[in-house]
């Protein structure tokens, strides 16, 4: 049975992604910092689906451990899903360099570090899939969260290039751009209900899009339209707006 | 973000706290004046609404499964649909399930839900071996049938504490398919006869055409069935259709309802016919359309569900169906069901008799109509289902639920009345 590696397995979205893949017959490597805190989830998934779940200690910002980590997996995964994300509060990131750096390192540098290794391996094997959870915030920088957004923009550009490179070898790359999602990260924000997805909706969308070999997924899908509009507002107007 | 109930009425602003662990919950209980637990928001009215809402769906780990005896232990935020996804293919099904699988286990206990097999299996609490609950003083208690806390909590509308986890026993099945028989009747008398004739079949429900007049009042499609025995346990949730926006309010005038009811009724063959149906088709036909509540428009809707004791069911139903038919306020869905004896829980809805459930768009004059229906329900010794209700008066509620004072007393004694409350509990003063 094939394994899927989930990087950043502690987030609400990752938890649901893990359940969906297990439900559909995949075994799992769940990688996160302090991975023993995922014992309950491992147990939950084993009861639900009978899938084999292995917890893996992984720190996305300890770049030099990534190669060793990937080699240590007992069986090469058929797919890798990067869900790791860190959303610093914008004003905090403006004031504290460490917050900005952490945002870049988790959302961008760390993701590239592990995916470079995965991509080289998958390309050689000529099979596999890669899913990167980016964000609609990366589609255009806004004053409300441009530091997080710019890191996600970089990640989206990386995934686009990776998809282009791996096309020849039959490895698929899916860029996921969630809009608002009802998670721990957004619990205290006032989100409009009709634009907000639940983590399990996002997970189902990711699974379906990945299985169909799609390139870019907006979830909820309405966000494709919203971002299309936002991207096309002329800069001379956009700079005056508060959205 | 504010949470609404399934009926999309009333809409109030609320503050949400998501349940993730017992420690966080204990702090929340201590620091919050009063709140109500909220599962997946499928109760129709105001029973899970308040200014402070504890969102429990985030608390959803499966904790243990005893494969020998089919006993599942899980956290209260697990949806029934998740249980089916995990266990139908292994030959297990819920002993009791309502007409939607999109409710949490905690919600199922708090509403003490029932299904098409109430006349043979009783309420959801029948399959609850044990549950844990956090009380108003943040103490966690475990209880089982026989304990007062159990009988107050099952059907207690979330007003006794926060259910944390439950041990529920599942039913062995040898197929994911149901052999169904559909009986088409011409009037209420035939409908009642059909229910009695088929009462030994575990699952039954009737769809009634509410707009039928005069001698046709009470004509129905009665659907009865039981699990097949063919060993085919293939089960996959169907891809859902979705209603992406609220329909404009003219979409559901009585003419379109009439057309719908007629089509549904006309589609079925005369007399008795046999079908084979999957679990989702048989038990959860409306779950196939996500957000079907939006067809009633943005003003929202309510479901009026009442039950009458068996000896008065026939005349009471006839009286109520006549009033509805005269009012012209039609219902997309009118569901008639047979029930067996009531249980010991203080506020569980079922009693031996028949219940009818009808949807109504919220509009001027509706509550007046429902008040007149209440009078008939009270006259015949019936009661209203709190899980569906958004408007029942304290007096009508009290007449229907003779154990309500015991429930009130229990709440007071354990200081639950100062911690757990909903718009509904304030209205009927429990």
Image: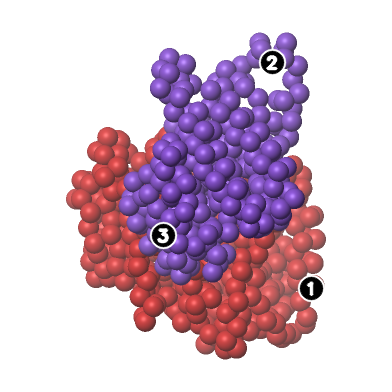
Mark 2 Cα-neighbour bin, 10 Å: few <14, some 14–19, many ≥20: some
Mark 1 and mark 3, same subunit?
Answer: no
- For the residue pair B391 and A57, the one nearer the viewer reads as A57
Left/right placement of residue B258 relative to residue B363 reads: right
- For the residue pair B146 and B363, the one nearer the viewer reads as B146
**Which color mode does the image show?**
by chain
Q: Nearer the viewer, mark 1 or mark 3?
A: 3
Q: Earlier in the sequence, mark 2 or mark 3?
A: 3
**Does residue A125 appear in this view?**
yes
Location of mark 2 (residue): A238
| Residue at image coords 64%, 54% | A124
Left/right placement of residue A231 relative to residue B83 reads: right
Report how far apart the C-alphas of labels 1 and 3 lie in the structure.
Answer: 52 Å
| Residue at image coords 61%, 30% | A154
Q: Which quarter of the figure has residue B364?
A: top right
Q: Examine the rendered structure and indicate whether residue B158 appears above or below residue B229.
A: above
| Residue at image coords 77%, 82% | B270
Label annotation for residue B267: 1
Report how far apart the C-alphas of labels 2 and 3 lie in the structure.
Answer: 47 Å
Location of mark 3 (residue): A54
Mark 2 and mark 3, same subunit?
Answer: yes
Report the chain shown in purple: A
Which secondary structure, mark 2? helix
Residue A216 rendering spot, x and y as whole percentages: 69, 43
| Residue at image coords 23%, 47% | B138
The subunit letter for the residue under badge 3 reads A
Residue B243 rendering spot, x and y as whole percentages: 70, 50
Mark 1 and mark 2, same subunit?
Answer: no
């Amino acid at each position: 049975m094939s394994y899927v590696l989930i990087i950043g397995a502690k987030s609400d979205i990752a938890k649901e992604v893990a359940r969906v893949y297990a439900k559909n017959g995949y075994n799992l490597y769940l990688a996160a910092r302090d991975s023993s805190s995922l014992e309950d989830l491992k147990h939950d998934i084993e009861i639900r689906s009978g899938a084999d779940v292995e917890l893996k200690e992984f720190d996305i910002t300890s770049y030099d451990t990534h190669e060793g980590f990937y080699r240590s997996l007992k069986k090469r995964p058929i797919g890798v899903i990067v869900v790791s994300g860190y959303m610093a509060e914008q004003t905090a990131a403006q004031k504290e360099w460490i917050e900005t750096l952490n945002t870049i390192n988790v959302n961008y540098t760390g993701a590239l570090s592990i995916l470079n290794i995965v991509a080289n391996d998958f390309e050689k094997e000529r099979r596999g899939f890669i899913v990167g959870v980016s964000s609609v915030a990366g589609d255009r920088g806004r004053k409300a969260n441009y530091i997080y957004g710019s890191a996600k923009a970089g990640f989206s550009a990386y995934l686009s290039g990776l998809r282009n490179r791996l096309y020849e070898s039959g490895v698929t790359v899916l860029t996921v751009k969630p809009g608002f999602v009802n998670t721990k990260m957004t619990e205290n924000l006032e989100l409009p209900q009709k634009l907000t997805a639940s983590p399990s909706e996002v997970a189902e969308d990711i699974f379906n899009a990945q299985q169909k070999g799609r390139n870019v997924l907006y979830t909820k899908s309405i966000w494709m339209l919203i971002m299309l509009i936002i991207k096309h507002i002329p800069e001379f107007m956009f700079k005056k707006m508060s959205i | 973000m504010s949470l609404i109930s399934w009926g999309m009425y009333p809409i109030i602003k609320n503050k949400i706290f998501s349940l993730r662990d017992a420690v966080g919950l204990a702090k929340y209980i201590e620091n919050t004046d009063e709140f109500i637990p909220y599962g997946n928001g499928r109760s129709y009215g105001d029973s899970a609404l308040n200014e402070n809402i504890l969102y429990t769906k985030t608390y959803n780990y499966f904790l243990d499964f005893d494969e020998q005896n089919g006993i599942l232990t899980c956290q209260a935020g697990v949806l029934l649909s998740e249980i089916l996804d995990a266990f139908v293919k292994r030959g297990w099904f819920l002993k009791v399930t309502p007409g939607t699988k999109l409710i949490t286990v905690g919600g199922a206990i708090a509403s003490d839900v029932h299904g098409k097999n109430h006349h043979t299996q009783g309420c959801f609490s029948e399959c609850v071996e044990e549950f844990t609950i956090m009380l108003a003083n943040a103490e966690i208690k475990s209880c089982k049938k026989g304990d007062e806390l159990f009988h107050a909590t099952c059907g207690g509308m979330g007003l006794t504490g926060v259910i944390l986890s439950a041990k529920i026993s599942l039913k062995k099945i040898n197929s994911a398919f149901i052999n169904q028989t559909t009986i088409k009747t011409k009037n209420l008398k035939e409908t009642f006869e059909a229910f009695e004739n088929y009462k030994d079949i575990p699952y039954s429900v009737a769809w009634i055409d509410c707009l039928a007049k005069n001698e046709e009042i009470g004509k129905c499609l009665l659907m009865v069935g039981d699990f097949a025995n063919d060993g085919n346990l293939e089960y996959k949730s169907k891809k859902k259709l979705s209603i992406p926006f609220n329909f404009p309010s003219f979409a559901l005038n009585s003419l379109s309802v009439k057309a719908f009811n007629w089509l549904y009724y006309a589609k079925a063959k005369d007399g008795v016919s046999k079908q084979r149906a999957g679990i989702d088709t048989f038990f959860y036909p409306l779950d196939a359309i996500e957000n079907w509540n939006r067809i009633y428009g943005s003003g929202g809707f309510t479901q009026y569900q009442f039950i009458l004791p068996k000896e008065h069911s026939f005349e009471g139903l006839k009286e109520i169906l006549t009033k509805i038919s005269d009012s012209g306020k039609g219902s997309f869905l009118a569901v008639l069901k047979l029930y067996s004896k009531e249980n010991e829980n203080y506020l569980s809805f079922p009693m031996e008799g028949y219940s009818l459930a009808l949807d109504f768009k919220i509009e001027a004059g509706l509550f007046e109509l429902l008040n007149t229906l209440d009078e008939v329900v009270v006259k015949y010794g019936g009661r209203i289902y709190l899980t569906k209700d958004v408007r029942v008066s304290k007096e009508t509620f009290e007449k229907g639920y003779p154990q309500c004072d015991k429930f009130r007393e229990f709440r007071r004694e354990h200081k639950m009345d100062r911690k757990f409350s909903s718009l509904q509990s304030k209205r009927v003063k429990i």
